[in-house]
Amino acid sequence: MTNEQTIKEFKPKLVGFLCNWCSYAGADLAGTSRNHHDISVRAIRVMCSGRVEPSFVIKAFQEGADGVIIAGCHIPADCHYTSGNFKALARYETFQPLLEELGIEKERLQLHWISASEGEKFGRVMNEFGQTIRELGPLNLSKERKFCPLVRGETISECSVIRKVQEFAACEAASSEMVNLEERRKWSLPDRHMEPSITYEPNKCIRCGSCVEACKAQGVEALRMDEKEGVILDELRCVRCGQCVMNCPLGFQEKTVALVKEWLGCAPCPFSRPMGAITEQDEVADVIAALQDPDKYVVAQFAPAVRATIGEEFGAEPGTVVTDKLYSALKAAGFDQVWDTNYTADLTIMEEGYELIHRLGGDGQALPQFTSCCPAWVKFVETYYPSLIPNLSSAKSPQQMLGAVAKTYAAAKLGVDPEKVYVVSMMPCTAKKYEKVREELTDAAHYWEEKGRHGHYPDVDAVLTTRECAKLFKLLDIDLMAQPDGQADTLLGDYTGAATIFGRTGGVMTAALRTAYEVVTGEPLGDIELAALGEYTGVKTAAVPVAGNDVKVAVAFGLKNARAICEDILAGGEFSKYHFIEVMTCPGGCVGGGGQIITTNVIKATARMQGLNKDDRDQTWRKSHDNPEIKQIYAEFLEKPCGELSHHLLHTTYVNRGEAVQAYEQAAAKKD
Amino acid sequence: MNEPRIGVYVCHCGSNIGGVVDCKDVAEYAAKLPNVVVSRDYSYMCSDPGQMLIKDDVKNLNLDRIVVASCSPRMHEPTFRTVVEEAGLNPYFMQMANIREHVSWVTNDTKKATEKARDLVRAAARRVIYQEAIIPQEIGITKAALVIGGGVAGIEASLSIAKAGYKTYLVEKSPTIGGVMAQLDKTFPTLDCSACILTPKMVDVAREPNIELITNAEVVGLEGAVGNYTVTVKKTPRYVSADCSGCGDCVSACIMKGRINNEFDYGLAKRGAAYIPFPQAVPLKAVIDQKTCLMLKNGKCTQACVTACERKCIDFTQEAEEVKLEVGAIIVATGFKPFDAKRVSKYGYGLYPDVIDAMQFERLTNASGPTGGKVKTSKGEVPKKVAILHCVGSRDENTNKYCSRVCCMYSLKHAHLAREKTGAEVYNFYMDMRAFGKGYEEFYNRIQGEGVTFIRGKVAEITEKDGQLVLKAEDTLLGKNMELGVDMVVLSVGLEPSTDADKLSEVLHINRTQDGFFMEAHPKLNPLESPTAGIYLAGCAQGPKDIPDTVSQSRGCAGEVIKFLNIGKVKLETTIVITNPDLCKGCRLCEKLCPYGALEFCHDQKIMEVESAKCKGCGTCAAACPAGAIKQQQFSADQVFAEIEALLEEVAAV
């Protein structure tokens, strides 16, 4: 656009953000002093230039602005609010690499200091800005998406555009004196891992300590902050819950990233998710390789909470349950069988429910019985309260049960070599990645070993978090919400309402009571929803009268609450008189799991809980023992709950990890 | 929510807007915008009939949102908010479009102006939908004040507030109030005796029942916000009980007597470990210096003071204690410290005994000073030639760039006193003569007439030769270099922030300007208050100033404090932020961004909480929050987004 005529005809759309005290007043002064100037800029008043958030600028460009100008009080000392102008400056500087990456001329975003007494300067700046934009012409983001690393043919693990948007969080951290950006650029610290779940990039980290706080809030304290080195991870103490991942601000810049994605059309891109400095170890590549391997029989399972969450990544409202679309999407992804962890949730209830009945009947096993579905909670007990290991239900988690029966019962029925079966779980959880590699969880291989078929393989081969699962779909160009409703494959696919509420706090307890009550009394439980146990509250208790006796139950989430309960039991307090206690590590249970969408918060978690409750109500069968495929597996394979085969395949043992931590800490103390 | 019902009012402002913008067109255009129920143009919206137009429409048409397109909101926003409020709506359901200052006054192009006016009205009519009712919060306050620093600034402020009937705590770091003014001899330009005018005020402080004087004490902690501060004060023990009558027997008895530099006399006289700072000290009580007292330092002493004290006041067991004060407002009157002339090594201060600084000269000329007011050299001789060097440690790239404002005038005073007391030839080396105050220029003229030699130039170096001090300088008016031998040199040192200004700025969360003095809220329109509401700045704590200015500012501050305490409650800003506990993830990025410490991390819930009373409403934290958990009232992201969207919605086509 160099042609004079075109320049004249082009009417640029310009937006100005002016601070109330200096620049807006300066603009007013230009008016009162009748300083005629280019009036193309439409001013938006803010109290302080420090209020102008990156999304304002992005929004303006997205809505068609050809240029944006921010004006505030002169640095260093004019700011009415002391230092808002410096924050505006820091954000402006953070914009530069992003604009460059997108191929947007840097002159389209300008920052000026205009005081209340500089009416003439205001007019001059307006004229110059208008002229500059006229010469640049209208802003058209390159149609060829030249900014896109994928279009440029680069192999990426992370998007450079999104990465630059994330830098706004780093910019704020620098303004908050948490981190020195100059130094940060020079860091070359090696990445740290807590195999096989968590990975941490110290060079990306902004040293805010949010993950450390999250870990403290869990009462685990496996992370600590070193100003230079960043976060120091303690593998022994860590339970892999992933709440640190959920709390890295680099990962949850909801508004800005969402706007940029909308503006640039990046929402369907698998790499458009901002990755925090602390995140899960990505197994998507392994899964894709398995799917492409003709020698592998790849089967999928997905956890209860995933169905109420993953839709969010594809534009659905939080709490939208997308079970049927997930079946189709996974089929489209090429899985040989698409099963449902909800099926084994029902199986868990059979095993764990009967176990409870046996314990209540006085089989000599410890009471209260603890649930064991949550692998982070299990490791927590093993590490911090090993004396309570006998209280943990010996029933495996639903994920592990599915792995075990997939490679035995189902493999046999389908006539597939169990060693070739590759079980992929979609989990709302990072601890599930840890659970799947636990040495003792290779029962399918043992089963076949006894039958003379040698082989070493785990029951579950790969675990994808909800986030990774979304990435997998996007990589395979599968739009989840556009999928037709599908069905789970038979054998391990049916589920009841009792299973689906496993995804939220109180769900396991409610499901277990539905079955145990009926088994013991022969009558169905009156109030099958037990809504009070499913509230978003850290600790809930109830007494359920069963055949003349009160069964005292408690439901907790958050390991800080769990710790208090354990301490109370050890001290012989109130909870030691309880019979059954459900503990989930994450807020609200798995709906708030460490593997969920990063922007999870109370509102979204609650919506997901409600989604699961609705799913429960919508089911034909709402009690695990009514599940026809459960009946079938007992009839054809397992014989009875807590029977011998169950004992081998569906129950497990635990490891005392307390001594290891103590030994390590004593050694460390000696070193000091 | 019901569908919003918007009324749009386009003001002609006579021909101010109407002469350029086609107001009728804008009003007709606005009528077609979504949710607009009525749209009118009128000659003067701010006039009574204009206001009535809005009120009637609200009533008759059941409007619930108002857009006024007229002048700058900085002009008439309060007016139209009141109109809307009187019409029975929350005043914050009103949005203005600035079509005068930003449109009609800055162009003659009717087409472009009308286009822009349409855009601005469209944006306002969209934004107003998202506006929310705000009821400014009011909280009660503690009707007491704290004054930090017992110099003339603190004394004046304390007396004013106390006499208005409010409890006033006056906290002074040293054992006595009085500050620097108590050390001065005469004051310019009137040459009245400093002590004579100050000491009665000091006595008033001691007598005033509403003043609680806490000496030997420092402010070490501050919590709360404007109206309700809790201040922690650390008291250093005096080791002398309150029964002390100030008789001075312990002072005479102290075995360290005459062995310690007396800070009141700037090292020109000695004192003991038990001492009374000066005869008119308030409170007039002895104090034992824990740094030099043998008993306190080593635990061994004859304890002659204990024997000497008839009233048995000496108490070595006293310990430091912290007290909490509840106050509504605070005045910082911590004064200044004289520039340390040793930092300008070329003048040989500390090396040559007859190179002294201005404060030492004050003590020399003071009748109650160490020499009884006789100005003598270190050899005890009356000086025949005295040089006075202005701007030492002021207006200097190497030390302080600012002008200390009082040195020119006190240098003239010193020239006068030196002439008067010694008859010596006096040479004043100055850079520029600054005599801006009332009676100052006249004073300058008077001193010029007293035979003082004024040389415009900065002394480059002072050396000693044959027992005389030799000054090398350039006389910039004559443009030639000169050498001058003198018997005494007085360095007119500048004023620097008090020693503890840095510590205090951290404790009180108040900023300092680049020169290190405390920063005022606005250099012109609010020089009395710090940027933190409820903390005021009096005297040299805010910047160098002379006594009249110090007193004016102190009483001004006192007036502000009295006004505030009288009102008895404080209204919080309407643009303050609120956090959403459901969205906050506790990353704490916002915590230190807030210049006012208004955001606090709640360890229990791992989320941030806003202390509304501290928030000034800039919205910086709202811009920074990665979780979108902070909302600024009146400037929420929704509201601004709506404004952006509507502004850019149409390619203007008129």
Image (spheres, grey):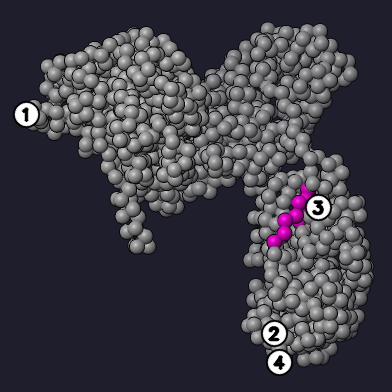
Q: Nearer the viewer, residue A404 or A468?
A: A404
**First of labels 3, 2 by sequence position:** 3
Q: Bin the neighbour count of mark 4 within 10 Å (Cα to Cα): few under 14, some 14-19, many 20 and up.
A: few
Q: Amino acid at mark 3?
A: Ala
Q: Residue furthest front?
A: A548
Q: Residue under circle 2?
A: B352
Contact, mark 3 vs mark 1 (Cβ under 8 Å): no
**In the displayed structure, would residue B361 be above or below residue B2?**
below
Q: Position of residue A566 (x, y in %)?
A: 42, 41
Q: Residue under circle 4?
A: B466
Q: Residue under circle 1?
A: A452
Front position among marks 3 and 1: 1
Determine if marks 4 and 2 fall on one subunit.
yes
**In the displayed structure, would residue B236 be above or below residue B602?**
below
Q: Position of residue B417 (x, y in %)?
A: 88, 77
Quarter containing the N terminus of chain B: top right
Front position among marks 4 and 1: 1
Determine if marks 3 and 4 fall on one subunit.
yes
Q: Chain of mark 3?
A: B
Q: Residue under circle 3?
A: B145
**In the displayed structure, would residue B308 be above or below residue B647?**
below
Which quarter of the figure has residue B361? bottom right
The residue positioned 22% from the left and 17% from the top of the image is A634
Label 2: which secondary element: loop
